[in-house]
Image (cartoon, helix red, strand yellow):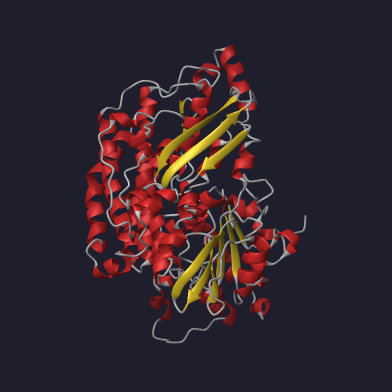
Amino acid sequence: MGVEQKLGNMGVVTTRLEDLVNWGRTNSTWPMLFGLACCAIEMMSTQASHYDASRFGMELMRPSPRQADLMIVAGRVSRKMAPVLRRLYDQMSDPKWVIAMGDCASCGGIFNNYAIVQGVDEIVPVDVYVAGCPPRPEALLDGIMTLHEKVRGEKLQEWA
Amino acid sequence: MTVGMNLGMPGGDNIQELSVEELRAKYGSGLEIQSEENMLLSMGPQHPSTHGVLRLLLELDGETVVNLAPDIGFLHTGIEKNMESKTYTQALVMTDRMDYLAPMSNNFGYILAVEKLLGVEVTPRAEVIRVILGELTRILSHLVWLGTSALDVAAQSVFLYCFREREYILDIYEMVAGQRMMASYFRPGGLWRDVPEEFVPAIRNFLDFFPSRIDDYEALLKENPIFHKRTKGVGVISAEDAISMGLTGPSLRGSGVNWDIRKSIPYSGYENYDFEVPLGTEGDVYSRYLCRMKEMRQSLGIIKQALDRLPDGPVQIDDRKIVPPPRSELGRSMEAVIHHFKLWTEGFKAPKGYVFQRVESPKGEFACYLRGNDTSKPARVHFRTPSYVNLASLPIMAKGLFVADLVAIIGSIDIVLGEIDR
């Protein structure tokens, strides 16, 4: 049953503003084109022909943080990179979300040493963690859909 | 531990707030500024065409690159140091994560070094399977290079085609190792386990359809006038310069230097295969492109020969001090249980001494220096990674060209930052 059958000839839909805005946000979440390490290659696979992330309204990856809504931290964050990452996050305009993709970004992964930030949540607030080293593209897509679920339940005031 | 904005840099500096000159003075980036009238620009670390987190300090006269210096270390992971605290087998997983476009090539170099240190010879079947997977990895890496470097010169569709074929190779990875990318399939003394039945038919199928796919990529790029304009005569490096800068791999062979470790210092039985080393003539971006495309075809030839001679037999050596016993023995033999326990708790011990092993990875000469000290953990591991050395010749190639050409050149030397910073 498609939406046109629900509408009939009425031509008018009533909904809550919050639902409409969140529906729009979930279906046009532009991620930032920003890869760090191994996970970035799986992120590219997710974008490419086989898995095709554009099915979820994110075919456009924006290299500029000003035009991006979602930061996918794909890979290990070194201590030299951490201030840069935070700067990029600060440059993104609201509303913005963060997915920590992979074990390194989530908790340091196998690199428990002097060079790697033990979880990117030390520097930016993370919405969804995706496990795996590296996560399969399906896992990243699942993370994106989990984020969509979260966005659908958000209040407009939170970003005001 | 609370980590704030200023972590990482000595003295708590926020690098984004420093000017290029301050950065140069403080951290010695090596950029010698020619004229105060020129513009200084920082390209990266977040830039779509630097293939990762490379930062380039550029001195520009208008749009012309007068001088540049790469600033690396944004992905420094401490892999070499971390490996010293792991057993030889555990340390293997670290090598996957250096050049993550060609994980099995890194495994190959490290595992050959470990075996050289231990003084063991693997079985013929394991040797041939390693060659098959090593060459598949070369194609895997070249596919990502082709897709991304074509994106850099604004050819979008090639990327989508390349990743379609890449998925097939990743499926083969998953079939043999259970992991899509970080396989860690080569183990000291052989392989993790024998390949499944579907392996040979899957590779045969790949050999059937892949040559026509290479034709497809070439149809998109080889005679494309825009691609020619962007690549021909761009980023030229002479054979002498290439040798003196230590360039290796297709980037070196694009300048016409015949140097391939598989031919010069054969390993893992490469001397028994019949293949050619493709050479370029011009030393520009286009020559390097041609070299890699021909290399993919040569790799297919090697895989075909290897499949035809794939012998039966075990894939692990018969030495319980190095290779764990099969699961079936654990219920019957006390000795097997003890070996299993010793190997998974302590690991095998390697003798005192050092070895140096080179392999031809897709990006060039990958070498592993390994020092043992009679314990189960390496005393020192060092990698000579091709991307790190190849990056050094970027200033030679790019000086006097436009910024847009610089982007094409970075794509053509095929660097991976995980391997550069380690």
Foreground of the two, B30 or A127: B30
**Whether residue B285 is situated above or below residue B405 in the rendered picture:** above
The reply to whether residue B323 is in sight is: no
Report the front residue among B21 and B271. B21
> With B281 as the anchor, is A142 left or right in this view?
right
View extreme (right): residue: B1
Q: Looking at the picture, does residue B262 appear above or below residue B18?
A: above
Identity of the residue drawn at 49% across and 21% down: B119
User: Is B214 left, or right, of A41 in this rendering?
Assistant: left
Number of marks in the image?
Answer: 0
The residue shown at (41%, 24%) is B315
User: Would residue A142 be visible to someone looking at this image?
Assistant: yes
Q: Residue at x 49, y 59 (%)?
A: A141
* In-front residue for pair B191/A29: B191
Image quadrant for the N terminus of chain B? bottom right
Q: Residue at x 26, y 41 (%)?
A: B276
Image quadrant of residue A100?
A: bottom right
Return the x and y of residue B345 as percentages of the image width and height. Answer: 64, 26
- The quarter of the picture where residue B224 lies is bottom left
In the image, residue B237 lies at what x, y percent? 37, 57
Q: Position of residue A17 (x, y in %)?
A: 58, 82
B270 vs B141: above or below:
above
Relative to B245, B343 lies left or right: right
Residue B327, horizontal then vertical, whole percent:
51, 22
